[in-house]
Amino acid sequence: MTTERHVFGADPGRTPSSLSSRPTYQDFFDAAWVGSFFRPLLIALVAASVVGGPLALLHLFGAPWRLGYVLPFAFVVALEGVYSTLQLGRPSWRVRRGMAFRLGEIVVLLALFRLAVWTFGTGWPDWTTVQLWLRQPSAFLDAQFSFLGFWILVVWALAIGITSDFLDLALQPDEIAARERHAWGESRSQLRVGRPMARSDILARFVARWTAGGLLLVFFASLSRMDMAILTTNVLHVGVRSLSLPPELLASLLCYFLAGLLLISQARLAVLRGRWYNQDLEVQPLVLRRWHVNSLLVVLAIGVVAAFLPMGTTSWLAAGVEFLLTLIMRLGYLLMFLLTLLLALLLWPLRHLVRTEAVAPPPVTGPLQLPTQAELVSRLPDWLGGAVLWLIVGLVAVYLGLSYLSAHGLLTGRPLAWLLRLRYWWRSRWARIGAAFAATTAAIGRRLRLARPGLRVNPGLPRVRVSALTPRERVRYFYLRMVGYAAAHGLARAPQQTPAEFAQALETAWPDAEADVEVLTAAFEIARYDRRPIPPAEAQGVQAVWRRLMRGVRGRASR
Amino acid sequence: MSEIPLLLLILLLMAVLLQVDFVFYIVYVLAGSYLLARWWTGRSLTRLQVQRRFTDHIFLGETCRVAIEVVNKSWLPVPWLRIEETPPLSLAADAGVHQVCSLRPKERITVHYELLGRQRGYYAIGPTALAAGDLFGFAETQGRLDALDHLTVYPRVIPLAHVALSSRSPHGAIRSQQPIFADPTRVIGKREYQRGDPLRAIDWKSSAHSGQLQVKKYEPAVSLSSSIFLDLNARAYTHQMRYSASEWAIVVAASLANYLVAQRQAVGVGCNGADPLTDACRWVIPPRPGRVHLMKLLEWLARAQLAELPALAEWLPTAALGLSWGTTVIAVCPTGDEAICRALHRLLRSGLNPVLVVVEPHGQFGVIRERARQLGVAAHLAANEDDLKRWAAGLSGAIGAPAVAGRSA
């Protein structure tokens, strides 16, 4: 009897010594689990079945749409989501993970769904419709595309979520590395083995989601059997009419629950597999091989047996519950009637207080229909806004779609070369446009600054981050800011003036700030000519003095 | 998985209230899966038959392959079965059985692991821990095969060529140097009659043939019927050497028994140690010859364990009551203290042939030997394998005791 020690790898014959010589990521990759063929199909089935609920709703409201293509399309979308998620889980696809890839995926799927709606649902648009889209872009999003497209995206997201859960259930590289290191005699790796992943939590999360989805689906199925006419004509009667379920809903329910059960079985296998792996148990290959067969047989057997069991035999119970509900509602109505009557009796004596004379309402004149200012000013064609919007949407969609296609390796050969040339051309154009824009804005800024009266730019004193300066530099900086401000207001320092002489001139011009000017000048002289270190507190004091000085001088100027 | 019953309840309510027949189908499928899983899992372990097979007696250094056979007697498969059995630490050649397997209906599988007889003893093999579960995680069950099997690892036996032991029992199979033990069944030649020769020694046929009286020459021989008394009183051993010296004492006793059986002598063993199989505190196996009897002795010695029991000196006079006159009593003790020497002296006076073998190294063994000699008991030091081999080689002087083969009582 053979046993399998390496349940994870694609190559069970690899020995630790060969691993230690040159390990690659494949040695730590659970290829046996990720590369399964059966599981993605189950996930796609479960995810696609969800769309059966909205289809049932549409059936209930009698939407005049052809919907036969929706379920197969949802299945294809779910398969795509599963496939892309599995691919993104591979280390070699690590660089492609990101929002751009997913957005590109959404764009491609929605584009395909739009084509599918045109092909199988509404028919291809004519020229008049296209013109309408230009004038009113929202017309593109018709009800069928919007409603079903939303649910298609829900199916896609669900497929991605379930696939991610099952990827998390696979053996993780750190677990494999920990076990291999443990096998090589390094006991430190046991710490990781002692903290295995919470696969049971992932399984519980999946079961909870599946349960919620199942309830929602059954709720939709139940809604699809309700006769709306009865409900609207007789509100006191709560009941259902014996309608048969639509076939697509039947298929959805069947696929959702049976495939879901099989997926739960797979998740259970993953939980056990991880536990066995971390506990260093030998697992016979037959266990994994028979698991799929056994679970399939059990579910099919139960499904077949359940099909032969009596259904709807509890109608007497339903009739009883229905009678009880009707009774409760009638009692409720009676109670409300009695309360209303009591309130009316109470208010009857007060009827004279609230009596008012009827006043004839003034004649209402219609509002004056005046054209808006935009309508008066605009001379542009009415389709231009829609065209611009479509251009932007198209560019974004093309970019995302191309990202998606290139990530999947579908963009090769001449189209790729052409796109690359286009990209380089656009980059060079964009760079030129950017440079021209920067030059223009700089020139405009210069003109605006020069146009302001009394403002002279001190080119030698750029704005700096004060906290990055040393205390000495900070003192000099504030002094020079004061000098710059004085120069901007007609008190420029002559080249031959010493700081003390310039301070006298400033004190004459700003008599209120005499003390502050002296303090700043003295601090500057120390910072400039003295070698003693300047403590940061002193620099902070100089900053406070400068602020006070500036406040005072600006206030004086404003007065 | 606690959501499943809740989901079933809600679905059932919806099915009843809204009379949706297909929801009943869903309820049946889910409830069927849930109930079947629980019933199936609860039943799977009870329908398993687990059996352990292995050779239950091995010699030191031998390996033993343990086979665990699992039979699924049910018509339902077992999706996964976890089998775990950890071997005794001192016998573990590998990690034991830690395996997960799957069983079809009526399928039989066998898993193996190996034991290595590193140390003599009587070992419990098992229990086997089993765990099984369903395919959906609704139920999991665990069980144990509590039936323990036992493996006996015989003590080490050191082959001895010759051991200087004396005997006072005539008519045995061992040649003796003392003519007093001449055995009339072992004729080694003839000689002419001399005055004083007993008439029954005359060989009449040879006398008639030669015309002169001829008498038969007999080879002196003794019978070395022996009983080995092993002291496994824990208090008698030095605390630091308690484990190693007691194990060595068992090796010495087993080697002596093997030697004596090889000499076609009857050997018995008595011990004041515990026996885990019979829960006996003191046990005596009377002397018998033969290999079968030797295996029995080795098995008892394999199981013997140290115990906090009365000293061998107190028990020895009682234990030796059933021995026949002249039986050699070999007392294997950690130290030859005065009490054991006096006990052996009493045996000497009652017609037995006591020998003292000391197994703990002793710095002043000469004192013990002299004390024993004064009491008429031969004392030997066999504190290690070299001592034992030297004794076996007949260099008795080297281990401090006079050659007892020539000593008479």
Image (spheres, rainbow, N blue to C red):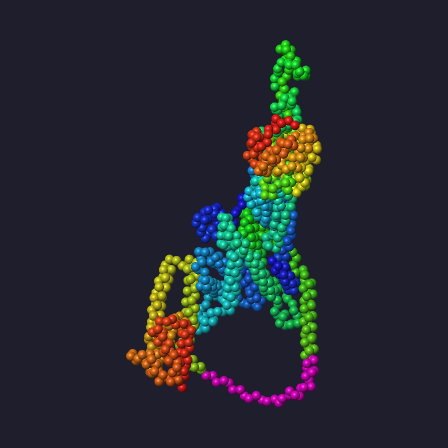
Among the 4 quarters of the image, the one containing residue A384: bottom left
Residue at point 59% right, 34% down?
B366
Q: In this view, does A430 lie to the left or right of B283?
A: left
Q: Which of B211 and A430 is in front in this view?
A: B211
Residue at point 40% right, 86% down?
A559
The image shows residue A524, relative to residue A30, as above or below, that is below
Residue A354 position within the rendered picture, expressed as x and y whole percent measured from the top left:
64, 87
Q: Nearer the viewer, residue B58 or A97?
A: B58
The image shows residue A406, relative to residue A475, as above or below, that is above
In magenta stretch: residue A143:
no
Q: Give the range drawn in magenta.
A: A341-370
Q: How many marks?
A: 0
Q: Nearer the viewer, residue B242 or A39?
A: B242
Residue B36 position within the rendered picture, expressed as x and y whole percent measured from the top left:
63, 53
Q: Is residue B170 left or right of residue A172?
A: right
Residue A214 visible in the snapshot? no
